[in-house]
Amino acid sequence: MRIVVFSDSHNEFFAIKRILDLNQGRADLFLHLGDGNREFEDIRDLYPGCAFLGVAGNCDRLCREKGEREFTEGGVRILMTHGHAYGVKNGLSSLVREAEKRGIGLVLYGHTHHAKITRQDGVVLFNPGTLRPSCDQTATYGIVDLVDGAINCKIVEA
């Protein structure tokens, strides 16, 4: 199972389109972790053969997506969240506690705009970064491969 994950696209419609064009047919699922659900919703119609899931971020007003999602893929329990409700800019401890409480093996989060892979207390926490480049931040997204319960995360330049 291959999952392509992006977050914090902030109106970067064509960045999402490039990623979909590159990974269409190679990925089983495309996830958006919030702050850009408007363009994410718009682009879904262009790729009817792709599976999409999204969550709302703190900048997603009038968004029909939930604040978080929990599901199982490839034998791994996954939590998708933007992360702002867990205070991820101040650390990951509350997110780790929530994951442990729910039996989550992989947490996908955004909000900080900084790509990061962390393994803590048996939980993998993966932030794919942001699709909106800035003077000090490269645009990135993530690829997650799930094979027989193993979790492999990779940060990719967009």
Image (cartoon, helix red, strand yellow):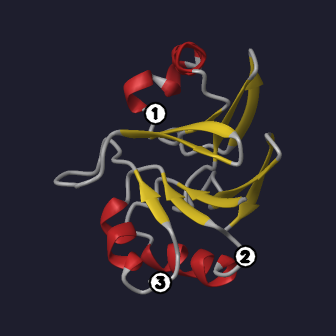
Quadrant hosting residue 28: bottom right
Q: Residue at x 29, y 52 (%)?
A: 65
Gap in angstroms between the C-alphas marked 2 and 1 = 27 Å
- Mark before the other along the chain sequence, 3 or 2: 2
Count of numbered marks: 3
Q: Quadrant of the C terminus?
A: bottom right
In the displayed structure image, the side of residue 34 where residue 76 appears, left or right: right
User: Circle 3 sits in a helix, a strand or a loop, which is it?
Assistant: loop
Give residue 152's position: percent from left, percent from top. Answer: 82, 46
CA separation in Å, label 3 and label 2:
13 Å
Residue under the point 40% across and 76% down: 44
The picture places residue 15, in percent across and down from the top left corner, at: 54, 74
Density class for disc 3 (Cα within 10 Å; few <14, some 14-19, many ≥20) is few
Q: Which is more toward the observer, 21 or 27?
A: 27
Q: Which mark is residue 28?
A: none
Crowding near pointer 2: few (<14 within 10 Å), some, many (20+)? few
- How far across and how far down the image is residue 80, in percent? 50, 41
Secondary structure found at label 1: loop
Q: In front here: 115 or 108?
A: 108
The amino acid type, in three-letter code, at marker 3 is: Tyr
Q: Is residue 133 left or right of residue 106?
A: left
Residue pointed to by mark 1? 83
Please tell me which of labels 1 and 3 falls first in the chain.
Answer: 3
Residue 24, picture quadrant: bottom right
Checking the image for residue 26, the label placed there is 2
For label 3, the residue is: 47
Looking at the image, which residue is at 33% across and 47% down?
56
Residue type marked 2: Arg
Q: Nearer the viewer, mark 2 or mark 1?
A: 2
